[in-house]
Each structure stands twice: as structure tokens, then as C-alpha cells.
Image (cartoon, helix red, strand yellow):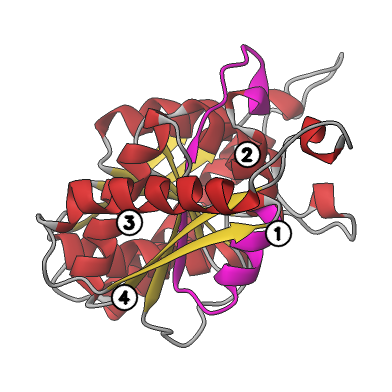
Amino acid sequence: MIIVGVDGSPNARTAVEWAADDAFRMRLPLRIVHAVDRSPYQIGKYPNVALPDVLLGEGRRILDEAEALARERQPTVEVETRDIEGAPAVVLREQAMEAAEMVVGSRGLGGFAGALLGSVSMHVAGHVHCPVVVVRGELRPVRGEIVAGVDDSPECEPALAYAFEQAKLRGSALRVVHAWQLPVHAFAPEAAYDMDEVRAAQHRIVRDRVEALRKDYPEVRVVEEALSAHPVDALTDASERADLLVVGSHGRGALGSLLLGSVSRGVLHHAHCPVAVVRA
């Protein structure tokens, strides 16, 4: 099933619309989840015992509105709701164990680049093993293109497979982008560096990754790009004309968002369209 987290925010509404559409395309049921976190109101000498009941009532209202929106958006999709006590990031991470895809909205409201992504969406994208789609703002008109970022590591293969499947379900083209930068030693005057050889190697990386999957998706039109640019910049630019940007994650850290690689973190903050993070 597809699971979407809601909290009553405008971005959560967009996430519900996205999730309902994907559930329709993938022919999967949709579960809408709201987390009720009592803990902030149970601290202190005289905790307000009435507040948790208010929170439960508000959670029910949020879920009812989200369910109505999903049913209006895609009447044939099977929809269920869950009101679960716990911290939102923990609740969604546990729910993701049953999900084929998790959809969350970004709560970031700050004016700084690092504040554009909420902590819950960052946590979920960094910890769960199913694809996580992070949406921001309102859904844009359909562009008819999916963008996938690839590199020379095997970790990007599940992300590319997910991008092919999304392109197939949507009838969209797939733009496969491999962006690279010269190693630092390439700028040393004494280092011999064959730029034509470097470019050829980068094109081979993209071609080999695509050819491994193209035979399974003959209906998908593929555009390949190998660019000399920072990956975050290249993928952010490509996202302006895309319906979805798909990246893998190479993060191997043990703490929080370190489980996300630097490129996936960067595009989550800066992309102009929804971003899917697919961990290997």
C-alpha cells in the first residue's frame, strides 16, 4: 500500500493529492496516517490533562478532511485512516514497514536553504527503506518528464528502476542525469588529464545503467545527459521541467539525516518538484 502522513498543513494536503494519484496509478490501497504526540503537553508539575483529548479530536478532523480529499481526487482508490499516538517521525517510520511507498509533505517555512525541509520529512527520507516522496507547495501542471540522478555506484540502481516504473505508469519521458566534477588533482598543472576520456567514461556510466533496464520498459522514451556540474545543481535545474525527481541515497551515517547522502539532502532542500528518495 501507499502511506501518506498528514498534519493539517497545506503541504500535507498536497501530499494526499500526490499519494492518491500514485495509488490510482499503481493500483494500491492508500493509508492516511496522523500522529498524535501527547508528550509536549505532559511535561511539568501540572500537565494539562484535557489537551490530549483536544489533540485526538483535532487529529480526527485532520484525517476526515484528508480522507474526503483523497476520495474526491481518486474515487476508485481504497482509502483507510489511522490516528496513532507517538512522535510523527517515529510513527511514520514504523508505518513505512508496510508501505510500497511513503509520501510526506515538507513543513519547512524558513528563508534559509537549510530550513526549507522539515525535520520529520528529512528523518523519514533518511531512515525508511521504501521509496519516500517529499512534496512541497501545490501540485504543478503536468510536465510529462521524470528525472533520475545516476552515478557509478550500485546504490543508484533501485532509484533508476523506480524512475523507469514511474515513467511507465505516467506515460512520461525519463531524463537520466549523471553530473560529475573534476577531481581536485585534475587542476594541478603537473597532472595529465584527458578530458575527452573523462567525458567518454561518464557517458558509458549513464548508458550502461540505462541499458540494463531499458529492455524491461520499451515504451519509455529515455533522454541521457552527462554533465560537468555539481550533481545538486544539475538535478535542481532539471527539476524545473519535471513532475518528479528521483535520487538514490548513499548515506551510511548512524545519526539522523546522515543516513541521507549529500546529494539527496541537497536536492530535497532545493528541487522545484517532488523528490523521491530510494534507498538501496
Relative vertical location of residue 74 with respect to residue 96 in this rendering, above or below: below
Foreground mark, 2 or 1? 1
Which residue in the protein does label 2 denote?
A: 122
* Residue placed under numbered mark 1 in the picture: 233
Q: Nearer the viewer, residue 21 or 182?
A: 182
Q: For the magenta stretch, what is the residue range? A: 232-258
* Disc 3 packing (10 Å; few <14; some 14–19; many ≥20): many
Question: Is 74 placed left or right of 78 in the picture?
Answer: right
Name the kind of residue labelled 3 in the image: Ala
Residue at image mark 3: 163
Position above or below: 40 against 69 = above
Nearer the observer: mark 2 or 3; the answer is 3
Q: Amino acid at mark 4?
A: Ala
Disc assigned to residue 69: none
Q: CA distance from mark 2 to mark 3?
A: 20 Å
Q: Position of residue 209 (x, y in %)?
A: 31, 46
Spatial distance from mark 4 to mark 1, Cα to Cα? 21 Å
Q: Tell me which numbered mark, 4 or 1, is placed earlier along the sequence.
A: 4
Give the residue at mark 4: 173
Label 2, residues with CA under 10 Å away: few <14, some 14-19, many ≥20? many
